[in-house]
Image (cartoon, rainbow, N blue to C red):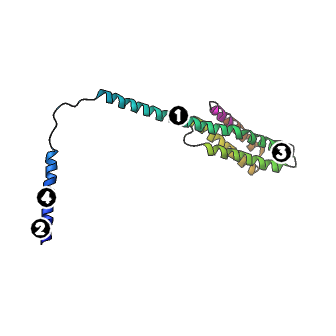
Amino acid sequence: MRRLERASLAAAATVLVAGGFIAACSNTVTGTAEVNQSELQLYTSEIRSSSAAASSSRAAAAAAAATDVCETLRDHNNPAVDAFNAYIDASDSKAPDVEAKKGAAITALRDTAGKIDEELNPDVPNEVSTPLRTYRYNLNSLADLLERNASVDEVNGQIDSFNADKDAAFDACEPY
């Protein structure tokens, strides 16, 4: 029974101490609240500065991402076009290495599409990413046509779209 008495005494003491804290903290403060103008200006300035820095950082990341994907386009486009044109020349002249040139063209077209795809990330601005995605799609479509031995008319139809989308991709990359 002694334990219960001690526990009750400890609980009662705790309640008295807690009540004393509550009573001591319940006093009101009189006066009028005033804004500290110098602290407000400092806070406002810090917020604006932080917002500007974040905006500047996003813009820098977008420009860097666009530059990377555009450099990839410039570095890899000509070898793909050259390989494709070599295949067309070999096909037109019925050269004995036409199959090898076709394989090289397919590889180069897919490689360029893959390299562009690797650089396309959420930081690339839409005005750059959209035409590059379309061009990447056309690179793969042209490779698909070659793989399935599509007719000359089909390939020529795709080439028109390919060239227009290639020009749009390069135009989008001009500032970068």
* Quarter of the picture holding the N terminus: bottom left
Q: Main secondary structure of the magenta part?
A: helix
Foreground pick, 46 / 164:
46
Which residue is labeled 3 in the image? Answer: 91
Residue 168 in magenta stretch: yes
Residue 94 in magenta stretch: no
Q: Could you give the CA–CA distance between mark 3 and mark 4, rounded to whole angstroms? A: 100 Å
Q: What residue appears at the point 88 percent right and 49 percent down from the top-left corner?
A: 96
Amino acid type at mark 4? Ala
Characterize the local packing of mark 2: few (<14), some (14-19) or many (20 or more) Cα atoms within 10 angstroms: few
Nearer to us of marks 3 and 4 is: 4
Q: Which quadrant of the view contains residue 76?
A: top right
Amino acid type at mark 2? Glu
Characterize the local packing of mark 1: few (<14), some (14-19) or many (20 or more) Cα atoms within 10 angstroms: some
Label 3 SS: helix
Q: Which residues are magenta?
A: 166-176
Q: Which mark is residue 59?
A: 1
Label 2 SS: helix
Mark before the other along the chain sequence, 1 or 2 = 2
